Image (cartoon, rainbow, N blue to C red):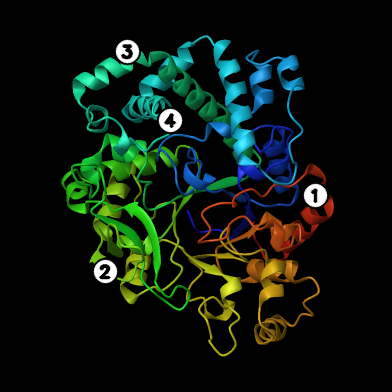
Amino acid sequence: MFDKRKSGVLVHPTSFPGAYGMGDLGAGAYAFIDFLQKAKQTLWQILPLGPTGYGDSPYQSFSSFAGNHYLISFDALKEQGLLSAEDLAQTPHFDLRKIDFGSVINYKMQMLRKAFVNFKPTTKFKQFCTKNKDWLEDYALFTALKDHNGGREWFKWDKPLAKRDPAALKDTKAKFAKEMEFCKFLQYEFFRQWRLLKDYANKAGVQIIGDIPIFVAHDSADTWAHPELYYLDEAGLPTCVAGCPPDYFAETGQLWGNPLYNWEVHKNTGYAWWCKRLAAVLETVDYVRIDHFRGFESYWEIPYGDKTAENGKWVKGPGKALFTAINNALGFKSQSPIIAEDLGEITDKVIKLRTGLKLPGMRVLHFAFTPGANSNHLPHNYESSLLVVYSGTHDNNTTIGWYADASEKERDYLRRYLNISGEDVAWDLIRAAFASSAVFAVVPIQDVMSLTAADRMNRPGEAMGCWSFRYTAGMLTSQQAERLAYLSELFFRG
C-alpha cells in the first residue's frame, strides 16, 4: 500500500488543455498520462471529482457520490454519435489559460442537453442506474428540483419537498422524470469516461490519488436525503457548523459553515454512510486523501449564526471506531489506502490516531523554512517515511510565487538549507521533495512548469475567483519529463 517510494504530479482535470473552456476527460487528460509515463512518475493527484457548487470549489459539492459532469469530453460524445462535427464547430473561442466558469457552464449544459436528445438508453446505462440507485435517485431528483426552484437551496423549497414528504416526492418524480433521466445520463457518461481514463493510467503504471473533504456542503443531496446524519433543525438549518479556532493566521478563526455530523447516529448505523462514501471513491481512484483529518479526533463546533469562529468549542470526533468500521466493510486488513491531511495545529491525540491507523500524513516544504523554528516540515525532522511530501498544495501559492512573497530571512534559510542560489527555486523544491525520506512525493504541475503566483489554483478565504487555472499543450515539455525522470531514478522513486 505505502511500502514503495513513489512520486507524481498534482493537477485537477479542469486544468487540462482543450477547446471547450475547461479541461475534461478527453485528449488533454490522456496526453498528461503519457507525460507522466515518459517522466517515470507513478502518481497523479487530483482534487475532489464531485459536481461543484457555490464558488466553483471542488470542496463544496452537491453530492459526495456524483461526478462532475462538466468534465465530460465532447470529443468522446462525438465519437459515440451524440454530438456532431457541426455542433463542435460552433464552440466559442474560450480563454485557453483561465476558466470563465459562468460562460463555460452555460455552453456545456447546452451541449450536454443536445447529446442527451441523441442518447438511447442501453443495457449498460440501465445497469449503472441499478447499481448506483442508492444515491443516484436522490441526486437526480435533487438536481431536477434545484433547477425547478431557480437554483435555490433545498431548505428554501416548499416545505413538503424540503421535508421529503412521500406523496410530494412521488408526484415530483413523475413530473420531472425526463430531467431525472438527463441527470442519470450525465452521471453514466462521466463515470464511463472516467473509468476508461483510469484504466489507461493504471496500464501506464500511474496510480491516482483522489481527494474528499471531511464535511459535506449544506446545500447538497447528502443533507437533503439524509438530514438525520447531521445537526440540522426542523427547518433544515444547521444548529452548529464547522470551522477552525482563532490562530496566528486567522485572528477570528475560520468559519466554514458546513453542517456537522451527528456522529452518534452514524455510530448506530455502523458508520454505513461513510463506508459507502469511501467505497464509492475508491472505485474511481487508487488512494484517497481525506481533508481535515484532525476533525475525526476532535472538531471545532461553532454555533449557527455566529459571524466568526471565535465562540466555538472542541468536540470529540469518532476516532478509531470510524476507521475500524471502514476497514472491516472494505476488507482492509493491516493498512488502508487513505492519506491523512494533518496540516495546521495538530495535537498528540491526532498524531496518535493517524499513526495508530498506519496512515501517512502530509508535509509541505513551503511551511518548512521559518528561521529558527526547526519545523516538522523540514526533511531532517520527518519522524518516519510514512508521509506524503509536497512542495506546495492546491491551497498554496506556486513555489515561485511563494518565494517572491517570503521574507528575506526565510529565503536566506531556504538557500542555506538546500545549498542553492534560488534562481530555479521551483525545481529546487521538487528535488528536495523527491530526495526526502517520505514514501510519496507529489508536486503541483505549476512547479513543474515554473509558473508564478498568477497561476495558483486556490486562495483560501476567497470564495470567488479561484480554481480557474489552465495550461496549454505546449507548456508540458519533454525537458520537464526528462528532469522528473532523472530525479525519480536518482532518488529511487518507482
* Mark 1–mark 4 distance (CA, rounded to whole Å): 40 Å
* Mark 1–mark 3 distance (CA, rounded to whole Å): 49 Å
Q: Residue at x 41, y 37 (%)?
A: 65
Whether tag 2 and tag 3 are in contact, CB under 8 A, the answer is: no
Q: Which residue is mark 1?
A: 475
Q: Quadrant of the C terminus?
A: bottom right
Q: Residues within 10 Å of mark 3 (few under 14, many from 20)?
A: few
Which secondary structure lies at badge 2?
Answer: strand
Q: Residues within 10 Å of mark 2 (few under 14, many from 20)?
A: some
Q: Amino acid at mark 4?
A: Gly
Q: Residues within 10 Å of mark 1 (few under 14, many from 20)?
A: few
Q: Which residue is mark 3?
A: 174
Q: Residue at x 29, y 58 (%)?
A: 305
| Residue 314 image label | 2
* Mark 4–mark 3 distance (CA, rounded to whole Å): 19 Å
Q: Amino acid at mark 3?
A: Ala
Relative to 32, residue 293 above or below: below
